[in-house]
Each structure stands twice: as structure tokens, then as C-alpha cells.
Amino acid sequence: MDWGIENRLSRLVKEDGRCQFLPIDHGYFQGPTSCLEKPSETIEGLLPYADGLFVTRGVLRSSVPSNTSTPIILRVSGGTSVIGADLSNETITTSIDEVIRLNAAAVGMSIFVGSDYEKQTLSNLSQLVNQCEPYGIPVMAVTAVGKELEKRTARYLALSCRIAAELGARIVKTYYSPEDFDKVVEGCPVPVVIAGGPKCETELEVFEFVYDGIQKGAIGVNLGRNVWQNRHPVPMMRALHAVIHNNATPREAQELYHDLSKKG
Ligand code: 5RP
């Protein structure tokens, strides 16, 4: 691996081989999502605890202090909305010049395997890898399912993750599946990080699936709503840090969450 790409990846994935990314990119197709109405306010308290921040160029320029030392993963796919015909009809929104100008540590984009726009989104990924690799910029592929959350079976996720890696993604972000998640990770020759999906009922549920996902080989998370839609986002972020970086059990993380929440 070239020094540049290795250096960027080492800023995102810590020495223990683990990472905790914070996605604040939901507005790119959902608009002012609950708890992300003012992205700068959501980002401010959480930024020091994130190993990487996943945002669009618009939120980066408007809502993130330019002196941050947190590496940025730039969301570079989009062009659809929740009220449009098909979320999978995405294009690449951001040029390589912009990616370099914004000093991104990596870029992230979605693929929609099995959708009407499968070929288009896989071609987006291939083209993006072609543009980014000469500059040492890693591409993170997001195995997206749009509104079809029921698609998130291990079989489907394994297929999507493997295709993303084969086309050149350096990291793949995918959903956790309660069954056979180890097969998803084992079938993917590049590191896998877990996305959260809609907010869970309890904190313990979140700690449990993150813990299990990591035991089964994921290197970390890219967890959004289950952090910033929580009543206590910073304690949630810090408790997840303990699971990811200190191998805390779900119960230990829950205790830490409660202690930190009480302290305010
Ligand atoms: C939105 C995304 C998000 O980054 C991803 O879904 C993770 O966020 P959450 O944990 O809220 O699902 O790609 O398009």
C-alpha cells in the first residue's frame, strides 16, 4: 500500500485496529433529520470523541470547525431524496478536486446491490476508486438498502460487501445481522464497519450488537442515530468507545453510560 493511503487510513483506524466513525450525513437525502436540524450543534459535543466524521461538503464547510484534528470522511454520493422515486438512483456529487481541497482523509459513497440502479451505483464506486487511488485517498463503500430495511440479511450483506471490496473499496460499511454476521465479515477481504440503522429501543441493544459485531470481526462502527438521537449523546459515544477500543462488555458499557449520564 502506498504511504499516502496508509497514512490516511492510520488516521481513521487507530493503533488497536479499531475505529468509531460518526455519520452526520443523513440530511443529504432526508433533509433536517430529527436531532440533526442544526448539524453544528450536534457535531460540536461529539467531535472530540469521533475517530472520523462522515459528512457532505455542505455540512463540512458550514458546520465543522476548520481547525479540527478529527479526520473527515467525505460523503460524495447523492442526488436523490426520501420523497423521490428511487433512493438508489445516486450519482457522484463531489469532484476529486473538491475532495483534495477539503483535505478529506477518505470518501464514502453508497452502492445499492439488487436495486434497479445496481449497475449505476457499482459503476459509481469503480469510477470513484479510479479517481481517488492515484491521490492516495481511500474509498469507503456503504452497502445501502434505501427504504427496504428487510433486505439486511447476512446473505445479502455478504454479497454487497464482497462486491464493494472487489471493486476497490478500502473499507466497507454495512449493517449488522443477528444471524451469520461472521460470514459477512469473513467473505469481505477488506475491513468492515457496522452502521446502526434506526434508533433501537434501549442502549443495551446497541451495545450488544456492536459488541457481537466486533467479536465477529468488524473493526468498528459508523453509528449515527443510535448516538445523536439518544437522550445523552456524549455518554452514548463514550460508552461505545469503551466497547470498541477497550473491549467493554455490553453490561459494562451500559453502566458507564448511566454513570456518565448522571454526571451530565
Ligand atoms: C446514511 C448513512 C449513514 O452514514 C449510515 O446509515 C449510518 O448511520 P445510522 O447509524 O444512523 O444508520 O449512510 O445514508
Image (cartoon, helix red, strand yellow):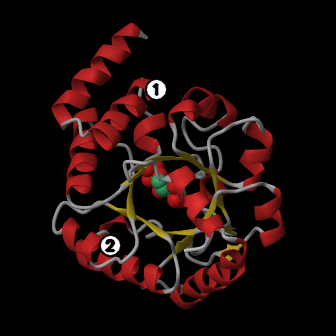
**In terms of image quadrants, where is residue 108?**
bottom right
Image quadrant where one finds the C terminus: top left
246 or 164, which lies in front?
A: 246
Spot occupied by residue 191 in the image (x, y as percentages of width and height): 39, 66
Spot occupied by residue 157 in the image (x, y as percentages of width and height): 33, 74
Identified by mark 2, the residue type is: Lys
For residue 234, which numbered disc appears in the image? 1
Crowd band around label 1 with a 10 angstrom C-alpha radius: few (<14), some (14–19), many (20+) = many
Q: Residue sitting at 60 percent across and 85 percent down?
A: 126
Q: Is residue 90 above or below residue 7?
A: below
User: Which residue is at the far top?
Assistant: 263
Q: Is residue 20 above or below residue 193?
A: above
- Classify mark 2: helix, strand or loop: helix
- Report the residue marked by disc 2: 151
Q: Residue sitting at 34 percent across and 77 percent down?
A: 188
- Classify mark 1: helix, strand or loop: helix
Q: Is residue 102 left or right of residue 183?
A: right
**Res. 95 visible in picture:** no
Spot occupied by residue 77 in the image (x, y as percentages of width and height): 65, 69
Q: Residue sitting at 39 percent across and 49 percent down?
A: 198
Q: Is residue 59 above or below residue 74?
A: above
**In terms of image quadrants, where is residue 62?**
top right
